[in-house]
Image (tube, rainbow, N blue to C red):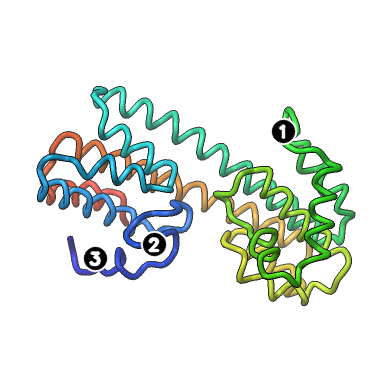
Amino acid sequence: MSDNLAKSYTSAQGGQQDGRLLDLVHAPLEAVAAYWLSLKKTLDQRKNGKILPEEAKHATEPFIKHLLKLLQSGLSPEDCRRLAGIKQRNLLRDLHRKLDLLAICLLGIADNENPQKVLIRIISRFSISPIFEKEVFEIAQQALQSLDNPKTRERFLLIDQSMKIEALIINMMVYSMFARRNDLKKMVVFSEYIRSYYFSEGMALIQDGFEHDFVKYRLILLRKEILADMENKMEMSVEMFLGIRKGLAYEDLFRVYDSFTL
């Protein structure tokens, strides 16, 4: 592993903890590559592959977890690539929708829109609503009344693309309802609970007074970049995973990573 890549692996904060990838959205490309290179080195040292079940068990990033499970399977490389592609499409679709929902919430806040209308726009993105409108407002209202409680803030102010969709919708409504009733400057203290830089940047633009059209334009561009970056990291992970499965030498696996950099 090069010194620069090793440094990225050990120091990058986004999407990482204790050497494991928590979130491909925030983890830099170098950190993703370093994960696979580190796994390759460990497998070469231990030879028997017994590390894989334990690694898969503790993996929290869904795409990485899926590849680790495939790495233990008896499936052919062609089947592994096909199944990895299916998982990739599903996860990218889910991410795309969540970013769309976050944009709806942000633009509603920018326009000081009625939270009920914001929720209708959100649930209209589903063929079947994943949550009941009345239940959302009841829970959000209760959360707003107890925001002084640290546990309430940790639960209901969290904004993370890895959240289940129902929880994400409720938390977005907490933000929407709070913004409707308060000065937006008061929401600055919420930033520590926002783990989505997409949502964080949108909130920063709104608080800085940028107009709706500019915020919308910026969110569209940022969404495209996030999805393209995510796809690139997923495709690199598949190629490195297949390289490990084929028994490529460490140096050749590094060359796979190098192909995905500028």
Q: Which residue is mark 3?
A: 6
On-image quarter of the C terminus: bottom left
Residue at the (59%, 49%) spot, across then down? 163
Q: CA distance from mark 1 to mark 3?
A: 42 Å
Badge 1: residue crowd in 10 Å (few <14, some 14–19, many ≥20): few
- On screen, residue 114 versus residue 174, left or right, reads right
Residue 247, numbered label: none
Q: Secondary structure at mark 2?
A: strand
Q: Earlier in the sequence, mark 1 or mark 3?
A: 3
Tag 1: amino acid: Phe
Q: Which residue is mark 1?
A: 126
Q: Nearer the viewer, residue 235 or 170?
A: 170
Q: Secondary structure at mark 3?
A: helix
Q: Which residue is mark 2?
A: 17
Tag 2: amino acid: Gln
Q: Secondary structure at mark 1?
A: loop
Q: Nearer the viewer, residue 206 or 152?
A: 152
